[in-house]
Image (cartoon, grey):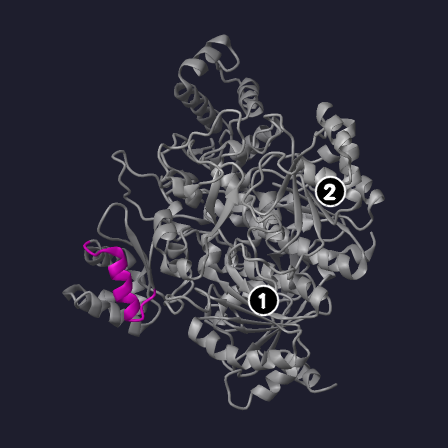
Amino acid sequence: MNPELNLSRSLNGVTILEIGDQMGDYASMLLAGLGAEVIKLEPREGSPSRGIGPFASDTRDREQSLYFWRYNLNKKSAVLDVDAPESPPKLAALASKADIVLLAGEYEIVARRLELWRKLAEENPRLIVCTITPFGLDGPQRALKTSDLVQMALGGIMAVCGYDPNKDGVYDTPPIAPAMWHSYHLGGEYAAVAMMAALNFRELSGEGQFIDVSVHEAVNTCTEVAIPTWVYSGLVVKRQTARHAAPNITHARLSRSSDGIFMLASLSPFEREMRALGQLADEVGIAHVLGTPEFAQLEKEDHVAAAIYRQDLLEQLVESLPADELFHRAQKVGLAWSPIRRPEQNLDDPHFAARGSFATIHHEDLGRDLKYPGTVASDGSAPHFSYTRRAPRLGEHTDEVMERAFTR
Amino acid sequence: MGDGNSNGRRALEGVRVLDLTWLQVGPQATRLLATFGAQVIRIEWREHKAVDFIRYVPPFAPDHANKDGGRSQGLTPRGRGIKGNYDRAGYFNNTNPGKYGVTLNLNHPKGRDLLRRMVRDANVICENFSPGQMDKWGLGYADLRKLNPRIIYIQTTGVGKAGTYKDYVSYGPTAQAFSGLTFLSGLPEPRPPAGWGYSYLDHSPGYFGAIMLMAAIRRQRLSGVGCYIDMSQSETGLMLSGTSMLEHQLTGKPTERYGNRMPYLDWSPHGAYRCAGDDNWIALSIQSEPQWRALVEEMGSPAWVRDARFATSASRKQHEDELDANITEYTRGCERYELMNRLQARGIPAGVVQKAPDRFDNDPQLKARGYYVDLPHSDIGTWPIEGFPAKLSGSPANIGGQTHRASPKLGEDNEFVYGKLVGLSDEEIASLREEQVI
């Protein structure tokens, strides 16, 4: 394969300066995976995300944060207190050789830092300055105090995730924010989209620009039918256990395989899936009436009863086989079923191994390799994101970065 | 950012995208390309089973809504969709703004020839058919590359076209279950996972698709090369599983769920607390001792806070069940927004668990930023469409794209695309229509 075809090097030559907190880690790591050089400018005590656990050791050592490891692959770290009065000339030197500056964090901090970057952008009109803040740089609530949980609440994802109400329709359990920092994921993905758009625009116009990403809006974009259901029909979707929120409570239930694993097993309203359900029941040896004239009659007369029959049959099937066997047999007949796996069950899965989905990263301190999820695509010879270097130690590249900034 | 005229300041000016995708994940990626000015041509076929399924899922515009009206005509009676009419679905309208719409029958040899002709002048082709379908038609990457070596070809499937499970079928929820995202969401075992109330992995992979396509487009502009991208929703799920797999590799322990709590920082209380009214909640995220003291003050310094169990953040974290029960005693009597405002005024991270009406009708921040964008549709009139979550000063996001419209009707732009862009004569178009090709 022509090495030129490897998309994971397509941002070679693009330099990004990253300044700020955990809201920016992921966005710049995505572009680093496409070949950009990302230099993280950190204060002496390290970026705030070095304080987020879990930690690789019992001490909360800033070099041992798994959060920092996860979201800072392929990057370089230089210690520079960007807020110190003597720093602007250094930042100007760095900016003159940079393509993108990413500022992430709370509104007050980012707005204050942005003043300098507005001046530096005048000197380097090709510079792209991207901010990621909780609510954007303007608007009455731009300075609200926040966290991933608060963003997931205000942004609407929480309201559609959680458990079924009780028999009286009352919710005994709270809405749930799915774990693992998804407001930062969403803000980061959209920031990466916007930065890619700005790089494309610069190729046409020669101009840089300012990008103002709002994490609140990013979360808001990602609630599927919740807004359209309200906008078009005036109905509010209700959260339900491990299935789609909908204006009414649907009758599907979460069931366990014979070895006790919860299964994602559902039917979409496609003829081929109805047939596949009957086929799987036949193969497993469970008697049923799918495909008979009686069932066709029931379907015609009482659509809901027919759906409940199919759901009952589906549950019987799920309970009759161990999860792994069920997964492969259901898939063989074309049913989109899967066990609800723990993430780590994928580490040794042959499918992901064959696709090169994990990057193997060496940690010399640990004397071992760790596998990191490292791409979302494959072209048969190379992944489209490529990660080869562990997250940097604090200041690991300070000399290199500063020397280069001051040499022509 | 409105449907404001982008004055030619489009990041993807001159980029033509042939969009053969359907459902959510593919159309999400091309939605973003259209937002930045690409000419996106949505290609569908009019047979019921070939039409994008999203065209016949609710919600629908009310039956009385017409092209001169829209939401302003009112929401009652509730729209049911008109049988056989694919042009009234609200979610489709929200997913496909700014795109052109044509019909093309790929099961007809002349339909495939017409697509080949279009590929010659296109920059990008997107599809999410079952793996292998395009190859069967002679329209796979190897075939199309011969016609246009610069073409960027992206295919998005649940598990990917390559790999051990390449023939497996998957929707967003399947990929969520498989990759581990479903497991991660919810209260600790023995409770089941709560999972996601929608197909998260029909959305994030769309954003990834746009990122990769824009990287590929930039490279195509600079060096003239194309590429093939075999993208999978499940791998996107792995990317989004946070630190769970690293922690497992280091400790050997199985991943556990922790509800709305925060095991990775010394933050407590941390969760959703019931407020006055029907299923109303507020999220609190106490991150420091001053914030805790401010919360105590706001609650009127009740006696229970002096209990040794709640003296330090570490001890509060050890007794989170009791802590949450005590806090709920306070919050359950409070109006949720008043409480949020009082807490925020004291510098406490607090936010209402907002439902759709809260976010659409009342969110002052979304309003001030102009997040929802009104766009016209040729049959159902003007409706608000969800916007792009960033402001760009040089090449603004423009949800209405090149069409200045919400979604296209099925085949709405056949004349424009096949006539103006492809260069067919009126007679040729008429005859293709007669032959059931377009």
| Magenta highlight range | B333-349
Q: Residue at x 30, y 73 (%)?
A: B289
Q: Residue at x 80, y 51 (%)?
A: B150
* Contact flag, marks 1 and 2 (Cβ < 8 Å): no
Q: Is label 1 in a helix, a strand or a loop?
A: loop
Q: Which residue is mark 1?
A: A72
Q: Please state the chain letter of the residue tagged with numbered disc 1 in the rendered image.
A: A
Q: Please state the chain letter of the residue tagged with numbered disc 2 in the rendered image.
A: B
Residue B335 magenta: yes
Residue A396 magenta: no
Q: Position of residue A318 (x, y in %)?
A: 48, 29
Q: Which mark is residue A310?
A: none
Residue A23 appearing in the image: yes
The amino acid pointed to by label 2 is Lys
Q: Which residue is mark 2?
A: B420
The correct choice, above or below, for B376 with respect to B344 in the image is above
Could you tell me how many numbered marks the image carries? 2
Q: Residues within 10 Å of mark 2 (few under 14, many from 20)?
A: few
Q: Position of residue B105 (x, y in %)?
A: 70, 29
The correct choice, above or below, for B103 with respect to B403 in the image is above
